[in-house]
Image (spheres, grey):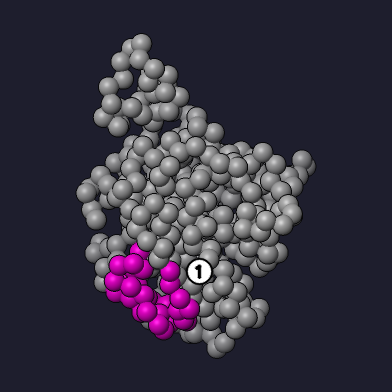
Amino acid sequence: MRLISLVALPFVLADFPITNTQQRPLVQDDASKHRGVSIPFFASLERLARLVDITYCVGNTGVSPPFSCVSRCRDFPSLHLERTWNTGVLLSDSCGYIAVDHGEDRKTKAGERLSYGPAIIVAFRGTYSITNTIVDLSTIPQEYVPYPAPDDEEGEPENRCENCAVHMGFMSSWRSAREVVLPALQAAREKNPGYPVQLIGHSLGGAVAALAALELRLSLGWKDITVTTFGEPRVGNKALAQYLDAAFGLKNGSVEDAEKLPYRRVTHVNDPVPSLPLTEWGFRSHAGEVYINKAELQPVPEDLRLCRGDNDPKCIGSDEEDESVATPLGSLRGEKVAEGDSMVEEAKNRSFPARLKFWQLFFAHRDYFWRLGLCLPGGDPADWGRESYDVSLAEVDVFKS
């Protein structure tokens, strides 16, 4: 079975190389409390989007110490690179970097101080693998077994996930990365005691970050973890989504503390990837969604919505309500699906609804505060000279570690 590649699709098409039964809803029904986020929260998400964009330099032009690359590394004088990893460009590729952020202060043009405390950053990149095509979205889920199993053959895992299934490609990608990530991360924590861990990822990297976060939080018992993903696909079935919700308390709390949740799953209007793999195939989204309800760059805090539950119909879940005609999976393979043929049943069960507009992967899947995925000087040429939202990059104080 080949690994699904989600961020790869635009390059393919363009031919470029535990649960709590009394949980309170995260957000109230009042529509006014759905819209808009605070400037510090918005600025934090935008900063993390720029950091995850830098992962696209790994395996390309590279990222080197102290924290240098052809893209936006110079915007982050407080970061020091620990190591990068790249497991290859084939079926189970994983790519990213680990860096220590010693913290910094920035000031908005209005004079408001924005503080980013010390942290250890683990950033997961999406994949460029053009060998993985749209048809790989039909991958069959496998049983999710929390680590230390299956590496540890002694006994049962402590945090069993009942009836959980995970996308086998995502799990394969995390397994290939963890052999590098865990030792480097543990070493960074020993050298920087008290620094919390921030996991970030885009597309496939978001799914890998989710699986990494579950292991760190449940198997290793690390509680000082924050996860922020952009365009994260569905990792597994409903039981796994609920398992993750419970692990990070995503359905607890009130509107007032929604921005303080330890898991933020950022989605973008028109991005089809957070709706993949399909619910028709047994996959489900988890909670913690922050929805960017603006199609074009650049969003402002008023364009973001803090979403409720696993599938808020006012957020990316609205795509699920489209009942338009499906495209048979067989036709995507170039196969003839004839009436009376056994493939007809497969096409009915494995199909891509017309609501999923794959050409939107060119932009909607990459337009998260910045256009992600281009390791060029300054990133996307359209962004050259553009400052982050309401933040003066000329006035930066780096904290002393």
Magenta segment boundaries in residue numbering? 56-85
The location of residue 88, given as percent across then percent down, is: 37, 61
Say above or below: 179 vs 248.
below
- Residue type, label 1: Val
Q: Nearer the viewer, residue 285 or 205?
A: 205
The location of residue 381, given as percent across then percent down, is: 24, 64
* Element carrying mark 1: helix
Furthest-right residue in this view: 22
Whether residue 133 is visible: yes
The location of residue 401, given as percent across then percent down, is: 57, 87
Q: Is residue 211 left or right of residue 268?
A: right
Residue labelled with disc 1: 180
Q: Is residue 260 left or right of residue 302?
A: right
The location of residue 135, given as percent across then percent down, is: 36, 37
Q: Quadrant of residue 385?
A: bottom left
Q: Residue at x 45, y 24 (%)?
A: 349
Please tell me whether residue 83 belongs to the stretch shown in magenta: yes
Q: Nearer the viewer, residue 388 or 261?
A: 261
Residue density around tag 1, few if under 14, some if 14–19, many if 20 or more, within 10 Å:
some
Q: Residue at x 60, y 42 (%)?
A: 143
Q: Majority secondary structure of the magenta segment?
A: loop
